Amino acid sequence: MAVYAAHLTRSFQGTPSVFQVTAQEALGTTLKPALRKVIEYLSVLYPNKCSWCTHWYDELYLLFDCIVQYNYLKYYAASFSESFYGLLRVPISYSSEFSIGQRLPIDLERGSLALLVLLPYVKDKVGAIIDKWREDNEDGKLGKDTRGRLRSAAIKVYAILHLVYEGLQLVQLARYLRGGSPSHSLPMAALGLTLRNAPPQELPEDEYTWSDLFKNLSSGQIGSAALTFPMVGGAVVRGAEYGAFVVQLLRWWRDRGAPPPSLPAPPPPARAEAAAARNRCPLCAAAWRLPTALPVSGYIFCYTCISRHVRARGCCPVTSLPAAESSLVRVYLDTQ
């Protein structure tokens, strides 16, 4: 009876809003690119010691993410981002195994870890391969042999599967909004889990806290001041959570689309240079193929050349002004 009551206490804490579940998903996808920037900076600063980290970054992040998510699933029954927004995972149907406090049953814990860590890793790897094949296909490098045809077919199949998955994900979220499903995403529904607002954590009466530390320091009782391991561990965890939120905020600020107003206008090319490069892409120096303009600088490139460069570096290759792939504009003109 006590086990069933504990299950009810967790199950009826309240259904999170769609803003909570989408915000925690957005926070979860922010960490990997943010840490990649840090690794790239370190590899430039210390090329002899850290250059290998950029090559094996996906595997290093896989290990890091596995450790972090396992710790949160074990002690908080939630992922890192879910715990930040005060959510926890709860089995949809009652199970007798659900009697160990906040910890999930072992099979659900392992399934959650696999879908949180391994599934994004595999999707990123497959997506990178497909993107490489798609670029080769745009450049006409796939060829007409059996391997080229199979890769062209894989590009189309991947696009269809991605579209179907995203459509089903949208349908699942719509059902969650209408109350037709307790799970907001397909992976959660596959595991038979739902999200609930976590109950407030009650500290033991005799536990030493930061307020006690500052109180002793302010009153001059230096001998009674102490720094315990739970205090340090909690501070590190909360610092990482709020740091991830700040990174997400900065990323949103960067991706708003409008370039900073203080950017100087790029200087016009020299007359001789302009005449030599007329109707030619500044990247490949060949005649334009699908001419595409980059509004931040005004230069015109081949679509394949500029889209690949902007995706990789996020700037104009001529002026180095910041740019995004979404700002590219197709130019229809007579190049003859």
Image (tube, grey):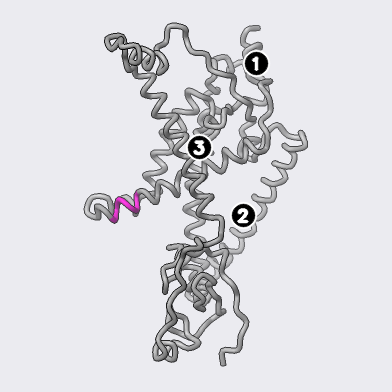
What's the CA distance linking mark 2 and mark 1?
38 Å
- How far across and how far down the image is residue 237, in percent? 42, 29
How would you rate the neighbour count of disc 2 (Cα within 10 Å): few for under 14, some for 14-19, many for 20 or more? few
Q: Is residue 123 above or below residue 202?
A: below
Residue 162 in magenta stretch = no
Q: Quadrant of the C terminus?
A: bottom right
Q: Is residue 74 above or below residue 175?
A: above
How would you rate the neighbour count of disc 3 (Cα within 10 Å): few for under 14, some for 14-19, many for 20 or more? some
Q: Earlier in the sequence, mark 2 or mark 3?
A: 3
Comparing marks 2 and 1, which lies closer to the viewer? Answer: 1
How would you rate the neighbour count of disc 1 (Cα within 10 Å): few for under 14, some for 14-19, many for 20 or more? few
- How far across and how far down the image is residue 246, in percent? 47, 41
Q: Quadrant of the N terminus?
A: top right
Magenta segment: 39-44
Q: Residue at x 34, y 17 (%)?
A: 228
> Which residue is disc 3 drawn over?
114
Query: Badges 2 and 1: C-beta atoms under 8 Å apart?
Result: no
* Secondary structure at numbered mark 1: helix
Judging depth in this view, the residue of 275 and 182 nearest the camera is: 275
- How far across and how far down the image is residue 143, in percent? 50, 76
